[in-house]
Amino acid sequence: MERHVTTRATADSREPEGKVRRPGSSERESDFDLPIELRRQHIAAELASHGFRRVSELADGYAVSEVTIRADLSALVGRGLARRVRGGAVPSDDGMGGVERTFEQQLGDHADEKRAIARAAAGLVRPGQMVALDVGTTTTAVAQELATDASLSEVTVFTNGLTVAMELERAIPRLSVILSGGSLRPQQHSLVEPLAGVLLDRMHLDVAILGCTGVAADAGITNVNLPEAEMKRRIADAAGRLVVVADGSKLGAVSMAPVWRLDQVDLLLTGTSADPRAVEACREAGLDVEVVT
């Protein structure tokens, strides 16, 4: 399944006005229309990375009107991803897109639900498979389930998460563990580029079980930071099956970094706290959603 994120719009998802000319790129390099939702995600990422952005700069960079940019910023404010200031916007101080919570800060959130999701995800793994787990509290719970399942043998787990590796260490040699290498991000105890994806070019994974911070019918699967979003894409591209694990609080949420469209995901495992309307919207968009009890 092709999972590379594309910014080329389909005919019915394009906004009437505007060619993309993102800041720092030439018109020739970006001669195509950008979907409204993806443009808003790019703007949120710019705010998170650079702070203040003027309406006029964004309008020029994305080749749309200032009226359109103001509408984009209003939408981001509504999602908690931005805050309007005179002449432009800055990243939100309290939204998911503004401040990344650490692994430890998230550890107690929806703990029972995460364990139920983890049991369901671990149940998808078969002896002899090559599996990937990335960073996060839910995927760490999956690692705990795999480590305690004595029926699993000759399973190799690739991970860029140090907490995942530590949970799996006790199951060696029944399970084999491969760490990606790369640069360490202390917020999530994760390994990211440069170098984190080098091994993936030499691997085929049977299944990738990956987390996220946002799942929405319109925005797809999103993540709170860009380095880990890139690693998620790299891991999924090497896998035959992609399973996303996300507790119910992630349903309907949108974070700044786009990761996958819903049609690039084989299965979403979530919990009973998920908004039923958000679940139904994702199903109507074609995503296979299992609500774990």
Image (cartoon, rainbow, N blue to C red):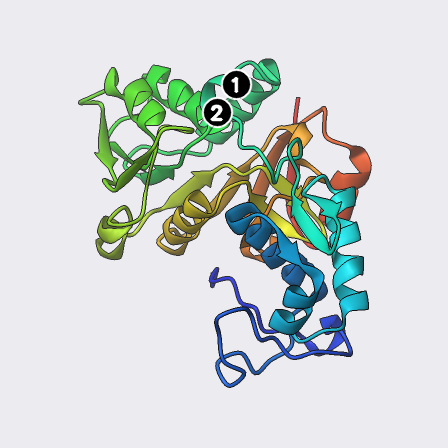
Q: Nearer the viewer, residue 146 or 79?
A: 79
Question: What number of labels is visible?
Answer: 2
The residue drawn where x is 24% and y is 49% is: 195
**Farthest left residue?**
173
Crowding around mark 1 (Cα neighbors within 10 Å: few <14, some 14 to 19, many 20+) is few
| Residue 203 shows up from this direction | no
The residue drawn where x is 63% and y is 71% is: 62
- Gap between marks 1 and 2, in whole Å? 5 Å
The residue drawn where x is 47% and y is 62% is: 4
Amino acid identity at mark 1? Gln
Query: Tags 1 and 2 in contact by the CB under 8 Å rule?
Result: yes
Residue 262 in percent (x, y) is at 62, 53
Task: Examine the rendered structure and indicate whether residue 60 appears above or below residue 265.
Answer: below
Task: Examine the rendered structure and indicate whether residue 101 appears above or below residue 243.
Answer: above
Q: Nearer the viewer, residue 243 or 251?
A: 251
Amino acid identity at mark 2? Thr
The part of the image, by quadrant, that contains residue 182 is top left
Residue 210 in percent (x, y) is at 46, 39
Residue 259 in percent (x, y) is at 52, 51
| Residue 281 shows up from this direction | yes
Quickly name the residue at label 1. Answer: 105
The part of the image, by quadrant, that contains residue 261 is bottom right
Which numbered dot is residue 102? 2
The part of the image, by quadrant, that contains residue 18 is bottom right
